[in-house]
Amino acid sequence: MKKRGSLAQQLASGVYNPVERLEEALYLISRLEEEVNAFITLLPEERLREEAREAQRRILEGKARPLEGVLVAVKDNISVRGLRATAGSKMLSCYKPPYNAHVVERLVDAGAIIVGKTNMDEFAMGSTGEYSAYGPTRNPWDMGRVPGGSSSGSAATLAYAAVDLALGSDTGGSIRLPAAFTATVGLKPTYGAVSRRGLIPYANSLEQIGPMARSVRDLAFLYSVIAGRDPLDATSIDYQPPDPYTLEPRDPEAVRLCVPEEIIDASEAPVKAAFEGLLSRLEAQGATIEYFRAPWTSLVLPAYYTIAMAEAASNLARYDGSLYPCHDSRARTWEELNVEARTRLFGPEVKRRIAMGVLVLSEGYRDEYYVKAAKIRRLVRDRVLGIVRECIIGQPTSPVLPPRLGERLGDPLQLYALDISTVTANLAGVPALQLPVSVEPLPVGAQLMARPRGEVDLFELGLLVEEITGLAGVSAF
Amino acid sequence: MAVEDCSKLLSKIRVLARLEVPPEDCERITEIRGFLEGVRRAGPLVEGLDPLYHVWEAESRLRDPREKGYGHVNIEDLGVETREGYVRLPWRGRL
């Protein structure tokens, strides 16, 4: 384990040196990337060196932009002009977006150096990082274990310190789960706070692009760059993210944390012990901890997966073999091409989700599945909004420690169960922050959920938690 | 679900989803279907609830009834325009 200094502090004090940092990152990549498999596309070293020299020049001339020379990784379902965006799928193995996603445009304008595009579960459909057409990602804390998914590569590359910041996307926990398994920090923003323009879609009403980092302050720093209204995303909202430089840890006596009993009961012993240890230390410092019953907990996974699969079936209908083609086909008609391409180029989990998605939307099933799921979403949203008006919800991010590679691969239901703690924030549209609470014997994370637009509450409480755990800035290497 | 029922299901999926799910996946598909049926357990908890998408009902342009060029329909009765259960369906244009 290594503890790294705060990027935000280095930038503020002017000691950050992009050239030196890049050389360290390239060394770590050459040593570890082959085993970890965090990247699908890495930029050529010479181009990165050139960008780092240019950033260093701007810093020395006093012309540094907010993220000047900072190394950032971007999940492979977020568009970067001219760089392959596969979304972890063979279907898009040749696709190079002709434009930047809104968030990438903001990163570039802020002076960031994009190091590469990160590995992920195919079309973000997975919770372990094993459902990528480009091979599984390994967890740098234990190479025999998964790093979590679907933003597996973004989390893993932060955990082995090849970059300082990363972008992920979160549809049902895809930022928070890998962050929990790799002792990093991840935020699922308030729905609409970050533009989704340029994100290859999976389930539009649930997913958000979000920041990942090794500390809360660094994460807040990235968030301040990417969040805010985009007139070209109809779901984005007028929103001013918190100023990362003025954030202070919250006074423990002003903390009221509400903990759902059902999620604690569903967590395995080491996770429960680590999380309850944090609660005890918060309480000892004067925080108020309250437990509450959440009887809807057993409904959130089927409701979430019904909605996500329905939206996935609709979103992925566009991939008919004629768009973004780069494979040989013997098909004679469009119909043949369509079935052949989708059958051959989608992976097994994507096919299962599309199949179930068309089923739950089809005549005779829609009322029994989709409409009921939508009503459950309404129930969850109403109840959660009622609670986060009064307090911050706190719970373990994952019910289990990082599973071993292959352990859950054969059983989709075991895979879906990993999301029990995370899907609620997506159903309700509220922000949720994951941060590490323990790294021994393996990483365990805590998740905090707040009111819509309540990211500032999460960051302040997150800074307090980091003071208690001492885990800000940790990495496996 | 019996294997022959699953075969029918896979045929339906081939038509609707335009992809072939291998017969050996029948067990998995059946399990997932059973899992999704969990939404039926909601019972009285969701009685009378509006199923519409409500994350940003007051603020999002998605749900701004003043915006022109889009119809507002009840998701339970697609095709019938209403001002009550409004949800914008941009891919359908004006109904």
Image (cartoon, coloured by chain):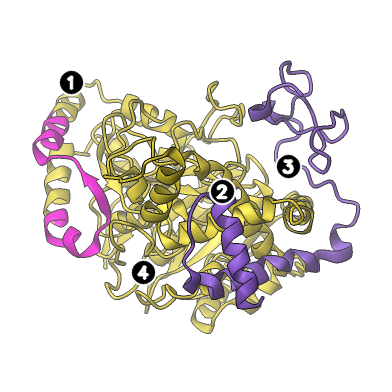
A119 left or right, relative to A242 = left
| Residue type pointed to by label 4 | Val
* Residues tagged by mark 3 and mark 2 found on one chain of the structure: no
Q: Which residues are magenta?
A: A28-53
Residues tagged 1 and 4 counted as in contact (Cβ below 8 A): no
Q: Which residue is mark 3?
A: B53
Q: Which residue is located at x 54 percent, y 58 percent?
A: A353
Badge number at residue A146: 4
Give me the chain letter of mark 3. Answer: B
Residue ranking furthest to the bottom = A269
Mark 1 Cα-neighbour bin, 10 Å: few <14, some 14–19, many ≥20: few
Q: Which hue is chain A drawn in?
A: yellow
Label 2: element kind: helix
Badge number at residue A313: 2
Q: Which residue is located at x 13 percent, y 34 percent?
A: A47
Mark 4 Cα-neighbour bin, 10 Å: few <14, some 14–19, many ≥20: many
Which is nearer the eye, A148 or A179?
A: A148
Q: Which residue is located at x 40 percent, y 70 percent?
A: A443
- The x, y position of residue A371, in whole percent, is 77, 51
